Amino acid sequence: MSETEDERLVLVDASVFITLAAVDAVELLSGLAGRLVIPKRVVAELVDDRSQAALSTARKEGFVDVKRAETELESARTHLGSSSEDTGDVGLLAHALTADGPVVAVTDDKPLRQTCKALSIPVSGSIGVLVRAVERDAIDASEAKETLYAMDEVGARLSASLVRRAERLIDEVEGG
């Protein structure tokens, strides 16, 4: 891992965390390069038992921190078009806007992804987490595809074309 990756702040959104918790794959986040943070406002959105249990385990194992955004909240609300709402997206974007070094937002939420891209904040998502897990040999391609299909079954709302693209990415990483 490079020094830059080691210093990188990896902000995880509820959309990814809930999906990974639903398929018992939250541990795949532990292999992402950087310091994993789930904003406090995102934690408030993890209301189902599986997500809460997965978060508790991840915190005990020490691969996820929970932090409260203190500044840039108004700016984040403005960028997201959220007048006064303190959503997880606002908390995540506020963290990204105040990051001292490299940052990546890990979200499947389309409006948040679009906002991050417009602000030149790198974005990844559930599929990126799977591809990275294959790259680092945490899981093999067939296991990654099984997880992909399970994510689709639990309501991750993956289009058929996105599933095919994800399968290709997984195969390329496994073969390359």
Image: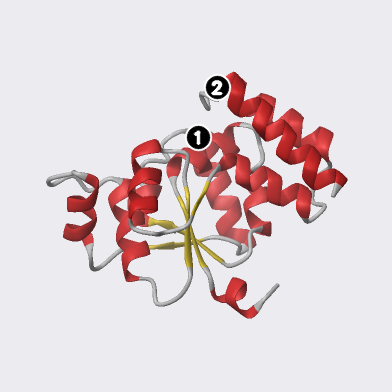
Residue drawn at x 48%, y 71% as measured from the top left: 102
Can residue 68 be seen? no
Question: What whole-number distance in Å separates the C-alpha atoms at marks 1 and 2?
Answer: 27 Å
Query: What type is the residue that disc 1 sits on?
Result: Asp
Horizontal placement of 62 versus 68: left or right?
Answer: right
Residue 16 visible here: yes
Residue 120: x %, y % from top left: 39, 59
Q: Position of residue 42 (x, y in %)?
A: 38, 48
How far across and down, in percent of the image, does residue 22 sit?
58, 32
Q: Are marks 1 and 2 in contact (CB under 8 Å)?
A: no
All told, the count of numbered labels is: 2
Instruction: Find disc 2 in the rendering and name its residue.
Output: 159
SS for dot 1: helix
Task: Give the residue displayed 51% in from the left and 41% down from the top.
Answer: 16
Identify the mark at residue 49; answer none if there is no mark. Answer: 1
Secondary element under disc 2, as helix, strand or loop, is loop
Q: Quadrant of residue 5?
A: bottom right
Q: Looking at the picture, tell me which residue is in the foreground, 18 or 156.
A: 156
Q: Earlier in the sequence, mark 1 or mark 2?
A: 1
